[in-house]
Image: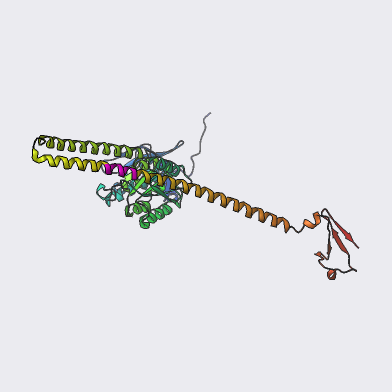
Amino acid sequence: MQQFFEEPVNVMSVSALTGEIKMLLEGEFEQVSVRGEVSQPQTSRNGHLYLTLKDAEAQISCVMWNSLRQQLDRIPEHGDEVIVSGSVQVYPPHGRYQLIARSIRAAGLGALQQAFEELKRKLQAEGLFDEGRKRPLPSLPGAIGIVTSATGAAFQDMRNTLEKRFPLCRVLLYHAAVQGDQAAPEIVEGIRYFSGSGEVDMVIVGRGGGSLEDLWAFNEEIVARAIAECRIPVISAVGHETDFSISDFVADARAATPTQSIVMAVPDRNDLLMRISDLQLYMERRLSDILQRHKDTVSRFLDNYALHKVKQRISRQSEMLSWQEKQMAGILRQRFLQIRDRSRYLADSISSAASRHLLQQKSQFSDLHHRLLASDPNAPLKKGYTRIHQNEQWVRSAGQFDTAAPFEIEWTDRRTRIG
């Protein structure tokens, strides 16, 4: 059986349908921002950038014209997570739509990394990273200012390391947040405080390791400029060995860890003692060589009668020097004993004073305790006495008592109403 089909009245051409879709899409999506992963980016001969933006379930073609591509700080690479802003455009000849990009910026950690690189290039161009502007660290600092969190492990590690290496050096802490919105301003305040106080010979700025977001305060421009403007040398000790921050590049020295910053800042007391011992041995050998040369010179003239008197005078002078050496040794020993006795006396005095102070505080506490017990308003009740209350008030004298009105008698364990 032959079937007949009635042709629809409104039949559209392919170009007409595509035109309708073009008007609908381009009018609805004039300004959109899309996040996704870059796939197969390519730059054409005329400079246009083509790429595919995708996620786990879909993809869309993107193009950025050469005039806008030239303004990018960095061409996105395959696998980068980016945010593309632009408009949707339909290309009728191929019957497909694409995203015309006006801007491409990194997303998530990529955005922080991009901001890091931009600030790094800016400060480097200003010369803040130049080795010529960096100052040497003092060889024997008397005091070090540390800008970090008082509750962090980094400060404890630095203080413990300093105590082991060079306990003669004082530590001054400026507590500052090292993470979060308030971290950068507080770090800047700490650097400026030590820069103008005149109390320390150098400053250490740092914290323990963490993610890029955790360390971001040390990548802020205000922190970098505060380090550059500091009047005394600054060591940047941020994160772990593989972590780098803007502060590391600006500071006079960079420590891989907070603990290493102390190693850089102060000498090891054992090394100093060894150096002193080596210098003492060197001086003794040099003096011995000089004396031996003079002895040899004198020996060549011993047979000369004219020098006999000189020899006798030298002998007398030698005996005098020997006697003076013994006298000086005795005086030094006596002085040492006096200092030792004085130190013991001071230690005993401090101990006694502390004991007296403790006993005095205990006596004051005991007195206050007894006074508190004596002023207990319920003490008479515990001894068997009673109170009379009338009209919710304690009757303290016979003149206050109204014999016609009801009243209450209070014992230590209860009250009884009368009347």
Magenta stretch: give its range.
323-331
User: Going by the image, does 358 lie left or right of 266?
Assistant: right
Q: Nearer the viewer, residue 65 or 219?
A: 219
User: Going by the image, does 368 lie left or right of 154?
Assistant: right
Q: What type of secondary structure mainly makes up the magenta span?
A: helix
User: Going by the image, does 351 lie left or right of 225?
Assistant: right
The answer, for residue 129, to whether it is visible in the render is yes
Q: Position of residue 180 (x, y in %)?
A: 46, 49
The answer, for residue 100, to whether it is visible in the render is no
Q: Position of residue 126 (x, y in %)?
A: 27, 52
Q: Nearer the viewer, residue 183 or 343?
A: 343
236 shown above or below 400 = above
Quadrant of the snapshot with the C terminus: bottom right
Q: Identify the residue at image location x=36%, y=57%.
A: 196
Q: Position of residue 409 (x, y in %)?
A: 86, 60
Q: Position of residue 137 (x, y in %)?
A: 30, 47
Identity of the residue furthest to the bottom in this view:
399
Question: Is residue 327 on the magenta stretch?
Answer: yes
Question: Is residue 68 on the magenta stretch?
Answer: no
Q: Nearer the viewer, residue 244 or 264?
A: 264
> What kind of colouring is applied to the model shown?
rainbow
